[in-house]
Amino acid sequence: MRKTQGAKISESLREMAAVGIPVDRPVAELDVEIEQVGAVCDTLVFDLPDGRAGYIADLLIINQTSRPIPIRDVELRPPWPNSEFEWLPDPRELGRDPFIYRFPGKGAPELPRDLVMNHVLLHRRILKPGCPVQGFLLGIGNPKPEKLLLGGLLEVRLAIIGYDHCEYEETITLWVDPLWKCPRESRKISTDSLFARERARNLGSPKPGNIGKVAVASLRR
């Protein structure tokens, strides 16, 4: 796991204040901490059968302030146009299996509802102080560029936007999945993996590696 950049800055400011260096107290307060957890391949972008891109992000989100934060929106911001992006709806609202989140299309990924935070973060729309929200965020967006290196890593921005228009943004790293392009049969995230067991015990997971990062400057052109 890793601390957000904002958390690191706030911690440094509090350390300065502790030794008598004048700092702006409100600035020194932590805001919203967003941590990417799990293995490298637990947070990924992949091709759906209909050509769109699917997103799975394994995250831990904590409101470190002393006040509730009502959420207006949560945005995933890859370095390419993503105007069609949407988060997967709660399966309990779709009239299908209420315990499974499914991406659209034959053979697309599916995950157990109790491991997904979409219905917690996006439907309740409030972050309570000191109450961690942990799980997978699942979304669908515009097709990803063909030039992305399969099996490489790509940095994108995740932003939580409050009703006061404050944005809490963090960089997360997506694995560009080379396998989920029209697989023969549906693949599931294993709930028996080491990382799932760690999540259930709130022990955390190893920090994703820094291997093969994809250069994204050309994608913004």
Image: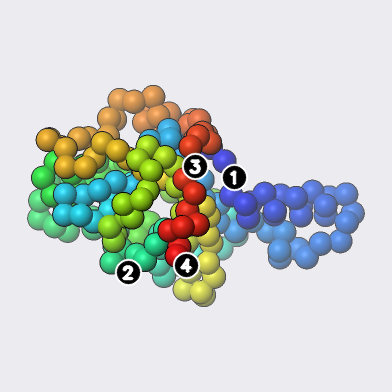
Residue corresponding to mark 4: 161
Q: CA distance from mark 2 to mark 4?
A: 17 Å
Q: What colouring does the structure picture have? A: rainbow
Task: Please give the name of the residue rendered at 34% of the width and 65% of the height, measured from the top-left corner.
Answer: 82
Mark on residue 83? Answer: 2
Could you tell whether 99 is left or right of 210 in the image?
left
Could you tell whether 69 is left or right of 24 in the image?
left
Q: Secondary structure at mark 2?
A: loop
> Badges 2 and 4: C-beta atoms under 8 Å apart?
no
Q: CA distance from mark 3 to mark 4?
A: 27 Å
Mark on residue 168? Answer: none
Sequence order check, earlier mark of 1 and 4: 1
Residue corresponding to mark 1: 3
Q: CA distance from mark 2 to mark 3?
A: 25 Å
Q: Amino acid at mark 2?
A: Ser
Q: Nearer the viewer, mark 1 or mark 2?
A: 2
Q: CA distance from mark 3 to mark 1?
A: 19 Å
Q: Position of residue 49 (x, y in %)?
A: 16, 49
Sequence order check, earlier mark of 1 and 2: 1
Q: Position of residue 131 (x, y in %)?
A: 49, 50
* Mark 2 burial class by Cα count in 10 Å: few <14, some 14-19, many 20+: few
Q: Nearer the viewer, mark 2 or mark 3?
A: 3
